[in-house]
Image (cartoon, rainbow, N blue to C red):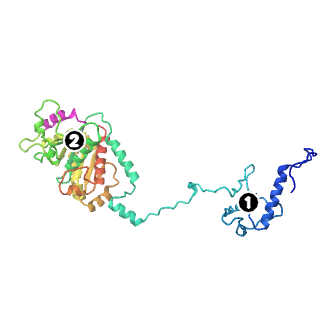
Amino acid sequence: MSDDRPGPDETPAEQPDLAVRRRQRAQGAAADLARMGIDPRSLGLSGDAAPGATEEPPSSVVPLRPDIVPPPYPPAPPEPAAGVPGGLPGQAVASAPSPEETVTVPPAERAVPVARTDPGRLLRSVARGIATPDAAASIQDERALVEAVRRRQSDRRVVAFVAGKGGVGCTTVAVGVGQTMAALREDHSVLVDVQTGALSLGRLLGGEQNASGTALLAHHEAVDPPRLRSGLGVVDAPDWEEPLGRREVGRLLELLGSAHAFTLFDVGDDAGDGAHSALARADQVVAVTGPGSIGAEALARVHERIGFVNPVAARAVVNVVVCPHDDAYRQTQREIGGAGPSFVVVPPERALRAGTPFDPAVVGAATRQAILRVAASMAMAPS
């Protein structure tokens, strides 16, 4: 056995490099093992063989110990195409990992199965109300409407809800807008029914107390009307025996206006002096009608009335079309769906067909959004 250590009589210049000699011996041993069909790396020797030595493919290598299977060879890198250099100048070429190292693919680089959407399942989910198409855009639109309803008002606002004919849902729209205002705004809103002889609005809405405009006129200072659980103040319509006149409506507006940012008058199709005075004092008007040719004629009559009584408010009227069934809703959407924010189409609402009052917790999402759009148009209108 030869000794790698230098002799004592040799000078440092004549002594060969010890590391080079050991490397040459290791390469020779590795080449001999490779010729015998034994993987030199299973013994911890380097895979760098001496010049002229060839390695067998991994399938022909017999492990030294049958119970220890050496890791497979790493895949050879693809050869560069003709004319393409193997590396850029100054770029370090990455060497293949050693067999002792475990090559782990990062989670970000692993193949992730892509979930496929079943069109039939999506349609069924939309039909049942589980999923909503364009949900992100709808949520963003609703947030913008809520911010518009919460807009700070510099002056007291008076809004009149007018209809060209009875039974189109004018009171329902007025109640929905009033409850929306009460729920979203920090100030107070009040709904005043000026239709002579109408049923008690406070009782229909489940209020614990109710008072008519005639009863409130007995007070000589600002008065707080009965309120619903939502916070909306409600003033019932006058009796047939004591209808409100123009002077009484003005006095009632003075009593309520100092404590309420929005005073909403439910005028409907009433043509009495009280309804005429409420329409004349409004800074904005919401015209409510039904679908079809009859609804269009009724809406035209409303605009004529507004232009005669209150020409200033006629410049910015919010038109609301309440549809009683699906066919009318689709037809109305096709006709005036793109008419702009001055037209709002209310879809058919199952919760209101039985004659029950408007309840935001019961009506559908499309109805709530339509009422929210009306309220936003009112709050954004210049006072």
Q: Quadrant of the C terminus?
A: top left
The x, y position of residue 216, in whole percent, is 12, 36
Residue 261 covered by magenta stretch: yes
Residue 255 location, quadrant: top left
Numbered mark located on residue 128 in the image:
none
Task: Give the residue pinned by disc 2.
Answer: 232
Residue 196 covered by magenta stretch: no
Q: Main secondary structure of the magenta part?
A: helix
**Callout 1: few (<14), some (14-19), or many (20+) C-alpha neighbours within 10 Å?**
few
| Residue 327 left/right relative to 39 | left
The kind of residue on which mark 1 rests is Leu
Farthest right residue?
A: 9
Q: Looking at the image, which is closer to me, 361 or 376? A: 361
Q: Looking at the image, which is closer to me, 304 or 275? A: 275
Q: Are marks 1 and 2 in contact (CB under 8 Å)?
A: no
Look at 75% across and 50% down and name the residue there.
89
Task: Give the residue pinned by disc 1.
Answer: 43
The x, y position of residue 184, in whole percent, is 29, 42
